[in-house]
Image (cartoon, rainbow, N blue to C red):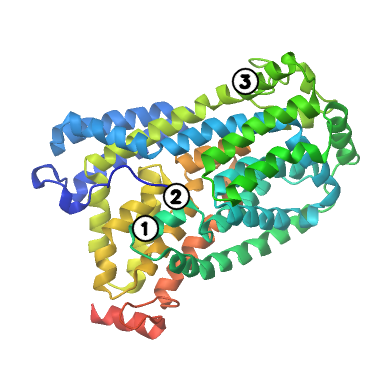
Amino acid sequence: MATLSFEPLTYGDIPEDERPSFRAALVPVFGMLVFLSVGAIALDLDPQLPLLFGIAFTGIVGRYWYGTTWAKMYEGIVDGLRMGMQAILIIFVIYMLISTWTGAGTIPSLIYYGLELLSPSIFLPIATILAAVVAFAIGSSWTTAGTLGVAFIGIGTGLGIPEPMTAGAVLTGAYTGDKVSPLSDTTNLAAAVTNTDLMTHVRTMRVGTGIAMLLSLALYTYLGLTATGNIPPGRIAEIQTAISGTYAVSPLTFAPLVLTFALALRGYPALPAITSGVFAGVATQIFVQGPISIEGFVRAMEVAQSGTAAGSGAGLAAEFKTGSEIVNNLLLTEGLIGSSWTITVVVAALALGGILERTGVLAVIAYHIGESLHSVGSLTAGTALSAFGMNILAAEQYMSIVVPGMSLRGLYDDFDLDSRNLSRAVEAAGTTTSALIPWNAGGVYMVSVLDVPVCSGAWCLDGYAPFYFLGFFSPTILILMGVTGWRITTQSEDTTVGIKGAVESLGDD
């Protein structure tokens, strides 16, 4: 379970002489969005520098307008980085995992066998279901995307399925399983910050998440049917021949995958489970792919550090080159060193979120959103908006749960609503939408492991966002529940409010 090393500021925690007004709190938010939009769209910059400008601008506003000291803002940055340290370490290790599993033949073998078992018409829904099952079993959407997701991208490419569609299906399945798993860190966190029993929260999440999953599966089935027949002649045979000509394709190569998932199922946290998978990948490369020698060990460790790349801009190293350019592109990895771009984005985003938290911007915005809510429907929608907004501003899915979860607990009590309604709202609208924000840790991570952008091209169709259906269905269904009162539970009667109760609560206000 994820734990926070600090408690984010609430509205009442901020000294009055340092508490910005709602309009003043929007200034650094507006500035940050300007920096990001101008930098990314007009100047085609990577997000690091726009985020850095956002940090500097927020610091100036905080010091000379709000009166927050430099020391406090620095502490906020440190707390933000500390909160995201687990995500940073996982990104480091995942880059090594993907590289070692490629060198070991694990991912190539998954692609090889997957092309034999799957067809375009069923691939997307099957990939979604498998990702959901694995994520539920191990409690981690990130681990699922970084392991099975990478293999599914390769299989889908061989079947003629566009990569953005495959990435969207993987994310829908991964986050579905994660949200209804009692092993998930964000699921535990949502229950903890709202004072909700864990299993009560899990049961409350199941209905809305299940409906969103079924709607998504229907759309993936349709997309799969439209993709049928698009496989270029001989592509599957070409890919399989190229893989088997370079790697020893064998069930033995699945040892790292089995070990990683076995440890996760036994309750080990994601970081030690994934790290074990890295060492298992190194051992498998030595004993299955060879050579079994000191030189083989050194080469396997080099793959963990630098990936399968031959060097800067040089493509695959000679021993990993196949006879297919498609396969070469699929199996090109950069190892631990390749994580630097991703890590710098995450560090900058976490620092910005930390300084926005310490200057009181996040607490003030959450408080004023809560003050404007006057019905069960508006409270649910406002919670969803607050959670999504934290994903944009704080760039970390944990904050999308913690800030609204802590700030809005009193309002749910005022409406006589059971805490499970709040825990469901912050997770259904917070965790599931983190992958839709390009600078959020979730979005940065998914882009880095799946090698598909969040949004690119006309209508974003070259990115995974339009095909990540759960990210849209989950908050939409949540809001509809609030508006209609369906499965909204009160404290006094422990029953659902229903449509009539929702209307009555609006009239009472």
**CA gap, disc 3 to disc 1?**
39 Å
For badge 2, the amino acid type reads Met
**CA gap, disc 2 to disc 1?**
10 Å
For badge 3, the amino acid type reads Ser
In the displayed structure, would residue 407 be above or below residue 113?
below
Side of 453 relative to 81 (left or right): right
Q: Which residue is mark 2?
A: 1
Cβ atoms at labels 2 and 1 below 8 Å apart = yes
* SS category of the residue bearing label 1: helix
State the image coordinates of residue 455 (x, y, percent, origin top left): 55, 42
Q: Write down the quadrant of residue 298 in the picture.
A: top right
User: What is the residue that sits farthest to the bottom in this orientation?
Assistant: 500
Count residues near mark 3 (Cα–Cα under 10 Å), then give few for <14, some for 14-19, many for 20+.
many
Q: Which residue is mark 1?
A: 192
Q: Which residue is mark 3?
A: 306
Q: Residue at x 15, y 46 (%)?
A: 19
* SS category of the residue bearing label 3: helix
